[in-house]
Image (tube, helix red, strand yellow):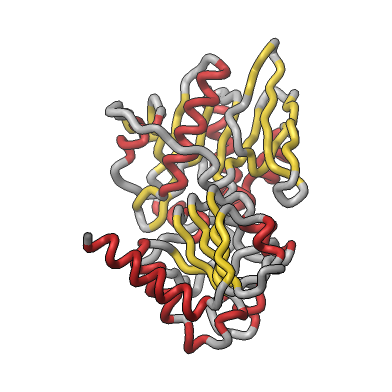
Amino acid sequence: MVLVLAEHQNGKLKKAAYEAVYYASQTAKVLGTDCAALVLGEASDLEKLGNYGATKVLQLADASLNQFDSQVYTAVIAQVIEQQSAQAFILNHSSTGKSLLGRLAARFEAGSVAGVNSIPTHEGGTFKVQKLVFSGKAIATFEVKSELKLLSLMGNAIQPQATEDTAAVESISVDVPESKLSVKSLDTIDGEVPLPEAELVVSAGRGMKGPENWGIIEDLANILGATTACSRPVADVGWRPHHEHVGQTGVAIRPNLYIAAGISGAIQHLAGVNGSKVIVVINKDPEAPFFKAADYGVVGDLFEVVPRLNEALKAHKEG
């Protein structure tokens, strides 16, 4: 069996959960087995995971698991892996997945690959999977020889295909250790798609000259239904919140469309966005490094280009 953790927030499944379940179902086909989704804590509409290939959903609806604790989750997941005799365990390459992958690998002395971006192969009994390395400049193939395979899936790496199938939800029971952590407060960002899950992202940098000019970027994002982002210098000086910082030292994203205005394209920024399907760069400097990575480029003053782009998009939508 291939087991996959389906992440949720406030009782609702994340977009990333459907990607992970679909990926796990395809991995299960490669291994000639079934796919089961694991849900820890209280969540609804779990039958929908069957749309993406889960043959069943295993839920441990313990309210204490609504709040993530890597030590507790590791202990619980390890028990479920053993109960189900799982051949592989799939996670999202999210903050949750990153916290769990190494712990589980150490506990089971199992091979793990973080941030995979392709369906594994299993030819001749050899399990192989690929991921991007060297800031996306090369593709590495890893062979996992351990009995249990542990993989984390890079966000937006594959497009899940939905069906009309549903999955039965089964309650499971394992020992849940008491958490050693006490959460005093929790601040969350509501009303927008989180950057790791966003399919459309509009970003800007120091070329904006100041936070008071950000309205045209927000207008563009609103028209497209996109999430806003920024470069590190912008977040460091407080023009934009730090959760919008994308790049090697910020959030790594893989949207279908990434629009960058007034960003030169330093290697640290490119490392976090070069997995984007399409990159559009707007910069008045024709020698900006970002143009080398762009699919489309506009050489011009962003304060002229972006408002005109907004007007054209509005006219297109109204038409």
Q: Which of 160 and 181 is in front in this view?
A: 160
Residue displayed at 47% across by 27% down: 25
Camera sees residue 243: no
Question: Which of the 4 image quadrants contains residue 148?
Answer: top right
| Rendered position, 317 above or below 131 | below
Camera sees residue 188: yes
Horizontal side of 228 relative to 122 (left or right) equals left
Residue 123 position within the rendered picture, expressed as x and y whole percent measured from the top left: 67, 14
| Rendered position, 184 above or below 117 | below
Residue at the extreme left: 319
Horizontal side of 222 relative to 22 (left or right) equals left
Question: Which of the 4 image quadrants contains residue 270?
Answer: bottom right
Q: Which of 133 and 109 is in front in this view?
A: 133
| Rendered position, 225 above or below 147 | below
Q: Which of 258 and 130 is in front in this view?
A: 258
Residue displayed at 55% across by 81% down: 208
Residue 112 position within the rendered picture, expressed as x and y whole percent measured from the top left: 70, 36
Residue at the extreme top: 124
Residue displayed at 67% across by 30% down: 129
Query: Which quadrant is home to the C terminus?
Result: bottom left
